[in-house]
Image (cartoon, grey):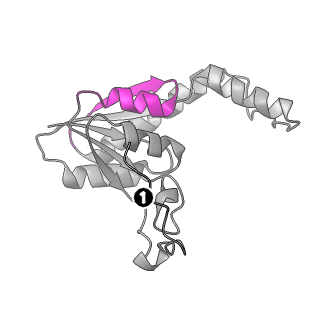
Amino acid sequence: MRALVWIVEDTWEATVAEAAAFLPADAEVTLVHAARSAVETLAEGSRHGLLGRRRPPPPGPAEPLRVISDEAAEVLLAEARERFGREAGVQRRRGRVEREVVAAAEGMDVLVLARDGDHSRLGPHSLGPPARFVVDHAPCRVLLVWADTPPDVDTIPPPPEHPPKHRPPH
């Protein structure tokens, strides 16, 4: 079995713990971290600038953002690998995060990731846009985990008052 474990700053500990618990001991595991490219980061800043929002100056010395990002990813992947407790490859990717994770999942048997949205209730908002894209486009099975204790079943939103209109099949 080949498994990919998506390492994200806020949820990596739960993702690694679930992967260690559910993946067979002989699984070939790769831990992947994906970061936005510098062009996307600059574009985001430019968009905020055009909308009149000011960005605070970066803290600390004026090191290039990519170097800082790469160093942080290395530390995060090393910690995740240690926490995983057995052999695992690591992969750093840069670009559109959701597309990089999907590309990394090609040829894998399973992808392990954590919910990255609203953790206060069950429902579609428990997945943020990147995780939703990955779940919808993954070329393999997906093990989706909660990074913390899942909410109670009574947090499911009520059904709509009127049933949706019947749509004929395509």
Quadrant (top left, top right, bottom left, bottom right) of the C terminus? top left
Residue at the spot 66% in from the left edge and 27% down from the top edge: 41
Please state the horizontal and vertical placement of residue 49, each as a whole percent of the image.
83, 31
Vertically, is 77 above or below 96?
below
Looking at this view, is 40 or 68 the one in front?
Answer: 40
List the residue tagged with mark 1: 147
Instruction: From the top left corner, tell me how far across and down residue 90 is, in percent.
Output: 33, 30
Residue under the point 51% across and 72% down: 157
In the rendered image, is residue 8 in sight? Answer: no
Residue 69 as seen in the image, left or right of residue 153 = right
Q: Residue furthest front?
A: 168
State the residue in front, 160 or 26.
160
Above or below, comparing residue 107 to residue 26 in the picture:
above
Q: Position of residue 142 (x, y in %)?
A: 29, 46
Q: Is residue 162 magenta?
A: no
Q: Which residue is nearer to you in this view: 3 or 130? A: 130
Point out residue 166 in the picture as x, y percentages from the top left corner: 44, 59
Q: Quadrant of residue 69?
A: top right
Could you say which quadrant of the image residue 147 lies in? bottom left
Looking at this view, name the residue that lies furthest to the right. Answer: 52
The crowd level at tag 1 (other Cα within 10 Å; few <14, some 14-19, many 20+) is many
Please provide the residue range marked out in magenta: 86-107
Say if 161 sits above or below 51 in the image.
Answer: below
Camera-side residue of 40 and 14: 40
Q: Single out the residue that lies furthest toward the bottom.
A: 154
- The kind of residue tagged 1 is Ala
Helix, strand, or loop for circle 1? Answer: loop
Residue at 70% from the left image edge and 30% from the top image edge: 44
